[in-house]
Image (tube, rainbow, N blue to C red):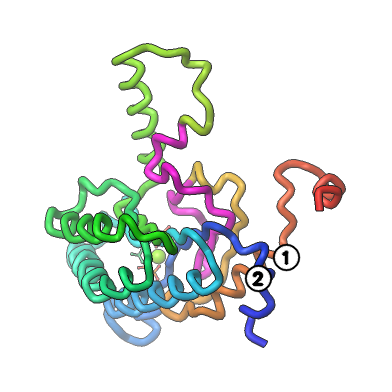
């Protein structure tokens, strides 16, 4: 039986976030260039988006390029940007056909103009789609996102002072890049690294974390379903006791 059939269809996470890690090691193991790893990684991303759509996930966030990744060698950064544009171009038709909405989170002002306009064009053209939302975290850093939200709030206060004590967590969330996107119930990281790497720090405060040693280019549909299956075995208590949770069922 495939893991997909084992899934409880009533408990599919609405939002899954993924730290797609291990492309470089995948390539090194095969004596290939790191960019070959990224290119295989892009294929894995496509497969996982399909898997998410198949089981009715509503949002999938893919960490494609972090703020810190700007510090990689110039050639690798340029190769990643070119790959991103190629992937969007080659998958755009399918994206529209499959009713997928594309969204970008991150500091897009740091992207080269050509990359930004390419990506933004796909975002605008898919805006009215109503199926799965694919959120690409690009030039994304969580601390900078939180700091940016704080600055926006302070600017608003400067323009027109308001009651500071009235600010709620929900208000604050509305200043984040992820405005209108529910928090992920599940965060997956591949390649065996056990860290968050500045990803969605605010949003994952109560997410279930799933780590696997599989390198991202090898991560397939079965791996994705397995992550969701493992998520479904967890008891999400949100600070309550097990008995309280059981009495709610
Ligand atoms: C993830 O793979 C992709 C990006 C960060 C862009 P890596 O490139 O980090 O692969 P490893 O960690 O070196 O194996
Ligand atoms: C995190 O992976 C960023 C992405 C997957 C895009 P990294 O490979 O850059 O993370 P660190 O540097 O190992 O923490
Ligand atoms: Mg890495």
Lateral position of residue 132 relative to residue 138, left or right: right
Q: Camera-side residue: 241 or 35?
A: 241
Instruction: Find ligand 1 in the image and state its quadrant.
Output: bottom left
Q: Identify the secondary structure beneath mark 1.
A: loop
Q: Quadrant of residue 161?
A: top left
Q: Residue at x 43, y 49 (%)?
A: 198
On screen, residue 23 above or below 200: below
Task: Find residue 67 and report its horizontal and vertical position in percent.
Answer: 31, 50
Q: Identify the secondary structure beneath mark 2.
A: helix
Report the residue marked by disc 1.
233
The magenta stretch is 172-200
- Name the dominant secondary structure of the magenta segment: loop
Report the residue marked by disc 2.
229
On screen, residue 48 above or below 2: above
Check the picture and name the quadrant holding the N terminus. bottom right
Magenta span has 194? Answer: yes
Task: Find residue 72 and report its horizontal and vertical position in percent.
Answer: 26, 60
Q: Quadrant of residue 144?
A: top left
Q: Residue at x 78, y 42 (%)?
A: 240
Could you say which disc has been placed on residue 118 in the image?
Answer: none
Q: CA distance from mark 2 to mark 1?
A: 7 Å
In this rendering, the count of numbered labels is 2
Task: Find residue 185 and report its horizontal and vertical position in percent.
Answer: 58, 54
């Amino acid at each position: 039986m495939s893991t997909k059939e084992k899934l409880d269809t009533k408990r599919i996470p609405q939002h899954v976030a993924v730290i797609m890690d291990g492309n470089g090691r995948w390539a090194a193991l095969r004596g290939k260039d790191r960019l070959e790893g990224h290119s295989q990684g892009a294929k894995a991303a496509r497969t996982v988006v399909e898997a998410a759509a198949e089981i009715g996930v509503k949002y999938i966030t893919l960490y494609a390029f972090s703020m810190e990744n700007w510090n990689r060698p110039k050639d690798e950064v340029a190769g990643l940007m070119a790959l991103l544009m190629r992937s969007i171009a080659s998958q755009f038709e399918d994206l529209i056909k499959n009713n997928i909405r594309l969204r970008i989170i991150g500091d897009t002002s740091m992207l080269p103009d050509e990359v930004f306009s390419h990506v933004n064009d796909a975002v605008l053209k898919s805006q009215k789609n109503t199926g799965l939302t694919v959120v690409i975290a690009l030039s994304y850093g969580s601390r900078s996102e939180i700091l940016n939200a704080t600055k926006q709030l302070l600017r608003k206060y400067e323009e027109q002072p308001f009651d500071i004590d009235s600010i709620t967590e929900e208000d604050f969330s509305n200043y984040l890049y992820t405005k209108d996107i529910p928090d992920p119930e599940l965060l997956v990281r591949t390649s065996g690294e056990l860290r968050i790497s500045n990803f969605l720090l605010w949003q994952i405060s109560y997410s279930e974390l799933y780590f696997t040693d599989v390198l991202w280019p090898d991560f397939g549909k079965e791996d994705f379903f397995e992550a969701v299956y493992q998520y479904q075995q967890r008891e999400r208590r949100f600070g309550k006791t097990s008995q309280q949770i059981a009495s709610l069922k």
